Amino acid sequence: MSKTATIEIDGKRYEFPIIKGSENEEAIDIKKLRDLTGIITLDPGYKNSGSCTSKITFLDGELGILRYRGYSIEDLAEKADFLEVSFLLIFGELPTAEQLEQFEVDIRKYTLVNEEMKSIIDGFPRTAHPMGVLAALTSALTAFNPKSVNVDNDKEMYQAVCKTMGKFLVIATWTYRKSMGYPLNYYDNTKGYVENFMNLMFKLPTEPYKASPIVIDALDKLFILHADHEQNCSTSTVRMVGSSHAGLFASISAGVSALWGPLHGGANQAVLEMLEEIHKNGGDTDAYMAKAKDKEDPFRLMGFGHRVYKSFDPRAQIIKKAANEVLETLGVDDPILAIAKKLEAAALEDEYFKSRNLYPNVDFYSGIIYRALGIPTDMFTVMFAIGRLPGWIAQWKEMRENKEPIGRPRQIYTGAALRDFNKPE
Ligand code: ACO
């Protein structure tokens, strides 16, 4: 017999089905709650609420498990490349060698961005934060590609995926070129996706440029680790915006804005700024630990804690190892890494952090690698966005294919009761 949950309100009992996921997670299906009882549930921040069923990513925060379409993140980071993982996330299965090659070829068809986009970039001050520019440019793509994709047409959907993957990478790097006052680069269709990222970012017209294979490998891995994370803030935003049948670019632009916040993707920039500040102030990690624990002080140890991981963040473990390797291979001796390690060791031993299950998250070490690779600090969150793009696309596509209803939460009103209109004296 299938499990049910009973809710008793004013002596009346109501039964609700309990649904089970493929990894045995359970949820009380309350779709009929309001119809039957007239009341709703209240769960700000959605700590206890599922917004959808999904076949894309599984994570177990207690056990520190993360899988895309059933494959462990450890396996994917070691054995697959970013476009392979993107294909897997978006279309559900690993591509064959032929499909993967075709995917790359098809993405290349869309790597030119309309030249008129450049006049939009020109309108931004050079000091604008790259994430703000990226959100605006992604949204602007809608103006140049006004036809909304028909999600029921596989060919159209595939084209839209390739177009988004191609153009987003280019405009993401343009935000940096703009901030530096450099000429904007074009995608080179003879090179791979991640190598192109490096070229688009760093190639100058005045000299030859060849990205280091170590750097390309490290970035590829970082993009894989960021590629999806089920219903996080930016992904839920993408699904929510898309649920009104807004287009893919508009939905992704909203995701970029959501990701920017320092409690989400913006944490990677905040971590590095925090580590730099600690370094500048003499490296006293104890003082910052004390600040983080002081309830009168709003300071938080950036890169620590996670809404769902309550034992460890498996991505952080892979990144920590990669950070060590990259710095060693590139021969970089970064005092910031030493501070990060000291802080991590202190937090792992500290009662405050232990009792609240606060462990280093994916962002704690990613900034250190980005820095070693020559990526400027305010581009860190853009790096996250490039990595997260296939996840956003996959989740948007799934939401539309599942014909999910428009996202429209309810509320409990706590404002004034009806009052007479009198102008204040
Ligand atoms: N430093 C110090 N204390 C913290 C931290 C931190 N980084 N994170 C949480 N706490 C404390 C809170 O003060 C709270 O303490 P209390 O119970 O005594 O009031 C308790 O731990 C629980 O914190 P919440 O904010 O309720 O936890 P929540 O699950 O809502 O937040 C979040 C998770 C936003 C990630 C939080 O841990 C945080 O702000 N971390 C720093 C920012 C960061 O690194 N964000 C990146 C997240 S990963 C990602 O987006 C890819």
Image (tube, rainbow, N blue to C red):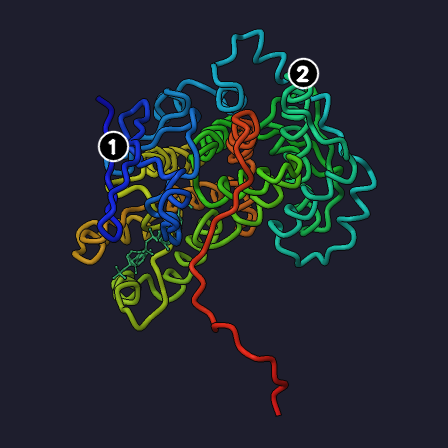
The residue at the point 63 percent across, 12 percent down is 102
Instruction: Determine whether 337 is above or below 88 in the image.
Output: below
Q: Position of residue 337 (x, y in %)?
A: 36, 48
For the residue marked with disc 2, what is the amino acid?
A: Lys
Q: How many marks?
A: 2
Q: Which image quadrant: the N terminus?
A: top left
Q: Is residue 53 visible?
A: yes
For label 1, count other residues whose C-alpha is less than 10 Å away and answer few (under 14), some (14-19) or many (20+).
some
Position of residue 49 in the picture relative to residue 355 (left or right): right
Q: Residue at the location (66% across, 41% down)? A: 250
Label 2 packing within 10 angstroms: few (<14), some (14-19), many (20+): few
Secondary structure under tag 1 reads: strand
> Measuring 64% from the left and 22% from the top, which residue is drawn there?
157
Q: Which residue is mark 1?
A: 4
Horizontally, residue 329 falls left or right of residue 346, namely: right
Q: Is residue 335 in sight in this rendering?
A: no
In-front residue for pair 398/416: 416
Q: Name the foreground residue: 210 vs 32.
A: 32
Residue 198 in percent (x, y) is at 60, 34
Of the pair 147 and 134, the residue shown nearer to us: 147
Residue type beneath disc 1: Thr
**Residue designated by label 2:** 155
Q: In the drawing, does residue 210 fall left or right of residue 358? A: right
For marks 1 and 2 on the same chain, the one whose residue lies earlier in the sequence: 1
Query: Quadrant of the rendered structure where residue 36 is?
Result: top left
Ligand 1: which quarter? bottom left
Circle 2 sits in a helix, a strand or a loop, which is it? Answer: helix
Q: Nearer the viewer, residue 371 or 80?
A: 80
